[in-house]
Amino acid sequence: MKDQGLFLSSLSVIDDVTERVCRRHRLAGAEAEDFQSEVRLHFLQHDCGVLRRFEGRSTLATYVTVIIQRLYLNHRNRQWGRWRPSAEARRIGPIAVLFERLVSRDGWAHDQAFEMLRVDHSVEELGAITAFASTLSKRAPARRTVREDEAHAIESPALRPDADIVRAEQDRLAERVQAALDRAQHTLPAEDALILKMRFEDAMPVAEIARVLHLNQKRLYRSIQRLLARLRASLEHQGVSRADVRALTAFE
């Protein structure tokens, strides 16, 4: 391997970041070991092409964090399918989306999710979220995993495929928009991609992002607006209109 030395010199950073991602998403045991192997293989592929593309615009740890987080999302989507927030959570706002993700996707109890909002995301006002939380307990039970030889005996709660044509069309639109967004994000420098992830996926306040990444807060606001404009232009170039995006956010 031509770049084995490059991989070995970066391995401690890769493993440290992988361990943090596993802890954050509660991967343990064999599942964590499988994910670590998947991460290492990704960095080894194509003569360490991912590492050779590192241009030094951010720290190696920042660059690696963006890549490994994306790998985790792909890993999770292969196991669970892509998670999407409910229309009600989107209507209430980013904090409700974050709470729903912690409870419905990641499996945290309500009191644990509330504590994570307070401690990790500096959310003090939880009145609207408390009311929203009561609706989550009335929804369908969380996904459970069974052995393949038992799967045939599990009755699906889903409607027949022809029972909801509109939702099927919305799902296809969502997949198209997500694919276009993924392509657009892959063109961003590592730090820019991390900023957008922290702001919109993790719902971190701009002030906290600036503190963590040692950036000027006022400039960061302008940078985020610039990045959003760039993503919007890329989506439009790929044929995704604002009407498409509005159709998804309005769908219930």
Image (cartoon, rainbow, N blue to C red):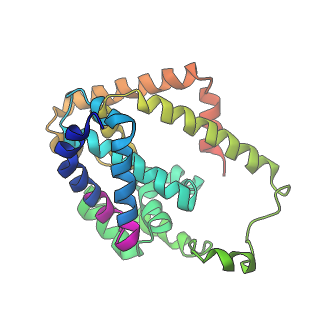
Please provide percent x and percent y for residue 57: 21, 27
Q: Is residue 205 magenta?
A: no
Residue furthest to the right in view is 162
Please provide percent x and percent y for residue 110: 41, 74
**Residue 93 left/right relative to 248:** left
Residue under the point 48% across and 50% down: 74
Q: Note whether residue 199 is visible.
A: no
**Residue 25 left/right relative to 86:** left
Residue under the point 21% across and 49% down: 11
Whether residue 188 is situated above or below residue 10 in the rendered picture = above
**The N terminus - image quarter:** top left
- Between residues 216 and 39, which one lies in front from this camera angle? 39
**Residue 17 left/right relative to 248:** left
Residue under the point 26% across and 35% down: 3
Q: Is residue 24 magenta?
A: yes
Q: Which residues are magenta?
A: 20-32
Please provide percent x and percent y for residue 56: 19, 28
- Between residues 60 and 208, which one lies in front from this camera angle? 60
Q: Note whether residue 100 is visible.
A: yes
Q: Residue 223 falls in which quadrant of the image? A: top left
Residue under the point 49% across and 31% down: 183
